Image: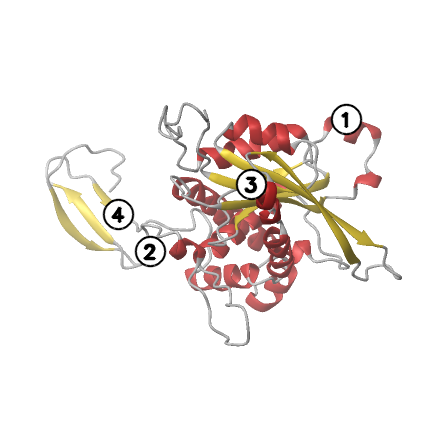
Amino acid sequence: MIKAACKHERKTSKGRDRKGQQRWKCKDCGVSWTVRPRNPLGDMRISIADAKLALRLLVEGNSIRGTERITGLDKKTACRLLVFFGGKCRVFMDREMRGLNLTHLQFDEQHTTVYKKQARLTVDEKRERHDIGEMFIWTCIDSKTKLMPSFIIGKRSADNARRFLKDVAGRLNMPGPGQADDHNFTKGRFRPIVQISTDGFAAYPEAVDLAFGPYVRYGSIIKEYRNANMVYTPSEMVGTKRTGHRNMEGRELYTINTSHVERLNGTQRLFMKRLNRLTYAFSKKLENLEAAFAMFACYYNWCWRTRTPGNSGQKRPTAAMRIGHPLL
């Protein structure tokens, strides 16, 4: 309880106010106060039921204006709710995604736009603004558990590649001094703890080496496509080029794969209206995009259940359940 002008501990009940909230009175100084229940939505004055409905619509791929029409909330209120809850999701995910044991991480970047397209930026905006124009959502996924341990949003630069790989490495169970040695002095090898697959972006090899050092099996894959006949029609993949950068050789090169993270890109475009292609939807602010994706990441890791291959219709456990998260 919060008492503004009283520090004594002895108190007695003084009934309830017009809203049914409990009031107390100090026995020593006579100061009275009301114990107000903590609002999970901060200073937002909307009902919990309306907030739950709006968040459910947003996480299921509805737009801000569509949520406004269905719930009756103003679009500014819906955006405030999105930023508030998305920030809480980011803190929750950053706290819980620690000490992970993953087997094969696939990395990729997904293109989107904030405020306006890159070609519309002025020379001054390109030089001074980092939060508008083209943005890339850096994601990774474990091919076995389908867990997305982390993400960042920013430009497609070598600096962001290093930041992202360092953040992911900090969430894994990295070995201590001597724990990963092969204990065979004739080989002099280190035992990798995870495999990483990326595309051909030139900044990845340096970032992987900086974040994981010798404790990784790393390879990249470049897919070759035949040109499509029409715009927006799917191209035909005609070949792949796999390159082993560290601790990968021979038949191990065939395990290099980025198909799962590319499929995750499609799931993100499905469940986030602002990422839909060939629509008017886009993010007006970078903080809205970051909050929306943080909310999607928590929903994907803790709530979304992917289907098993085939026509059985059965669903897998959630990604957090598959890694044995202590909260589940």
Callout 4 amino acid: Thr
Front disc: 2 or 4: 2
In depth, the one of 193 and 124 nearer the eye is 193
* x 81%, y 36%: residue: 121
Front disc: 3 or 2: 3
Callout 1 amino acid: Arg
Callout 2 amino acid: Leu
Sequence-earlier tag: 2 or 1 = 1
From where the camera sits, is residue 69 visible?
yes
Q: Is residue 133 left or right of residue 16?
A: right
Q: CA distance from mark 1 to mark 4?
A: 53 Å
Residue at the disc numbered 4: 34
Sequence-earlier tag: 1 or 3 = 1
Label 2 crowd (10 A; few <14 / some 14-19 / many >=20): few
Q: CA distance from mark 4 to mark 3?
A: 56 Å
Residue at the disc numbered 2: 328
**Residue 72 position (above or below residue 218):** below
Tell me which corner region of the image, top left, top right, bottom left or bottom right, holds residue 5: top left
Sequence-earlier tag: 4 or 3 = 4
Residue at the disc numbered 1: 127
Sequence-earlier tag: 3 or 2 = 3
Quadrant for the N terminus, please.
top left
